[in-house]
Image (cartoon, grey):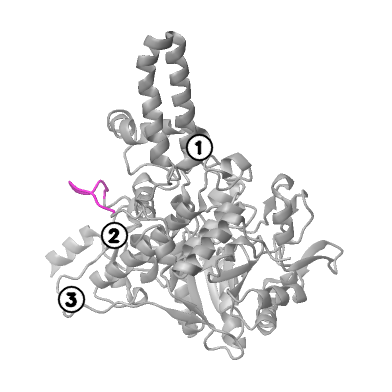
Amino acid sequence: MAYQPSNVGKKVLNKYLSKGKLNALTPPSYLPPLQKPVEYLTYIVALLSIPAYQWWGGWGTTWCLVLAAILFGINDVFIQDDHTITRIYGPFGRLRYLFENVFRDKYLQYFNETNTDGRPIPKIVRDYIYQKAKGYKSMSSFGTELDIYDSENTTYARILHRNFPGTPPETSYGFEIGEKRSGVKPFKVISTINVSAMSYGALNYKACETVSLGAKEIAFVNTGEGGFGPHGIAGNDCVWQLGTGKFGAGKDATLSNGDTSRVLDEQLLVDTIKKHDNIKMIELKISQGAKPSLGGHLPGSKVTEPIADVRKVPVGKTVISPPQQAELIAATPKESVAKLMDFCKKIRELTELPVGIKLCVGQLAEMDLLVEAMKVTGEGPDAIQVDGSDGGTGAAPNLYLNYVGYGGAIETIALLDKKFKNAGIRDKVILNASGRLFTPAHAALAFAYGADTIETARAIMLSIGCIQALKCHTNECPTGITTNNAWRMHGINIPEKATRVHSYLSGFHHDMMGLTKSLGHNDPRDITREDVRVITDKVHFASFFEEDPFGVFLPTPQKMQEDAVNS
């Protein structure tokens, strides 16, 4: 059966439908009705401990203070909805905010790191995400803390605004995937920033429902390889990813070589799409940046009954995804690519939807085979999600996470954009960039080098309340996002967190369009390489392709001086 939303999810969705989403979102100033009364009652009981000493002695004071502590804990754990950590850990969770808001800056200033340190996402970038998620203006004073030659925080570039733009352009954005395919329902993309793949199972139902409700009407959501379930409860646009395990649309089968694998269940695929008209595109996962060339792994302890029902696998049994789509197994890379052309065509015909692929680039010769096959046959994917090789939300072996794959999302986008343009078929495929693209500054560089839209997963997790504890794969996520531990999940208040997802997505898009206007363009896809000043890891301006993965020629300062003297 189809995934059944939780009672809270249904309640929020009904509120959306009756009031309209914008009117139903939780405003930053909202307080649960009981929060202030319980806070005041806590203060009153605590103050009564003073006269209680006169009336009943030390025991009276003790009991008043104990009752005040209990009320304080009840308010933190069950009533307030702003802080996930305190909902899970009670008053002890406030220590985190005490250290962050009161002591952190002083400690870092005198003893340790700065705001621009921190891995994998520096604090200064996380702050942008948190501020947008909470609906705050992202503002600072007294100058930048960044070193403009620090590639970690400046995305390798400076954005070159217009001082003399002429008439300011009217900005707009949007395009359709599959509009040139006959018999296909085009998928309209309306946002510069969208939700990248995070599977149901890796994320729990509360996190997935939160994403669905937050993204409704403003961005599409990629389901990840865990099947179509809570990602689409709000009726939001969804890209249904079919991983190598075909979860939600697959069945076990024995291959011709005797190996067992999972293959596409065509009827199951078609039936699911007929039931859910918010599935707008199918995406075949070829590989991902966290673990290129490897399959997935979901421990049996996380395969609960609802997850098993969505994935169409046994309850409590560890789920292993094979490293390759069974339908693409062949003797040579060329044959495998040819099978991909046929497989994409078959799924398009079955579903009448555009078909995309997700991959992390490895061997460049294989990309040449893909481009050539698409040019010759006119088939293949309508969109390619280009994953950077520096990992993401997915758990992966350190060896693959740290050392396998071509490179980051931006340089990989530049590579594929160049290859498709050289083949004369760039207009036949949409390129989606994903991986370390958290702010419009990151996105501007991706657009300049060929991206059509941006997808992010980690920024969405941060907007829900992730604190970058790096515990995603342990089922011990301290903020309740990547665990099915009931108590930790309790920390996620769906209406409040869905509002934060909405605020981040809409805030990012608004800022991206504003940055586009500052560059003198009306569409982010019009941003060019001339609009950015690229800096390499060698901390000088790139002069040759070998030094510059984006393929830009920008002379070094020394070369510019020499040319000026010689002229």
Look at 39% across and 23% down and name the residue there. 46
Tell me, for residue 165, which label it has, or none. 3
Q: Earlier in the sequence, mark 1 or mark 2?
A: 1
Specify the quadrant that holds the N terminus.
Answer: bottom right
Specify the quadrant that holds the C terminus.
Answer: bottom left
210 and 66: which is toward the camera: 66
Q: Which one is in front in this view, the residue at disc 1 or the one at disc 2?
A: 1
Res 132 → quadrant: bottom left
Circle 1 SS class? helix
Q: Is residue 510 left or right of residue 73?
A: left
Tell me, for residue 541, which label it has, or none. 2
Look at 69% across and 78% down and name the residue there. 343
Q: Is residue 192 left or right of residue 202?
A: left
Question: What's the magenta bit mostly, secondary-structure-wise?
Answer: loop
Task: Report the magenta residues as a range.
Answer: 138-147
The amino acid beneath tag 3 is Pro
Res 362 → quadrant: bottom right
Label 1 sits on residue:
77
The amino acid beneath tag 2 is Phe
Circle 2 SS class? loop
Look at 37% across and 66% down and name the residue there. 509
Q: Earlier in the sequence, mark 3 or mark 1?
A: 1
Q: Is residue 525 visible?
A: yes
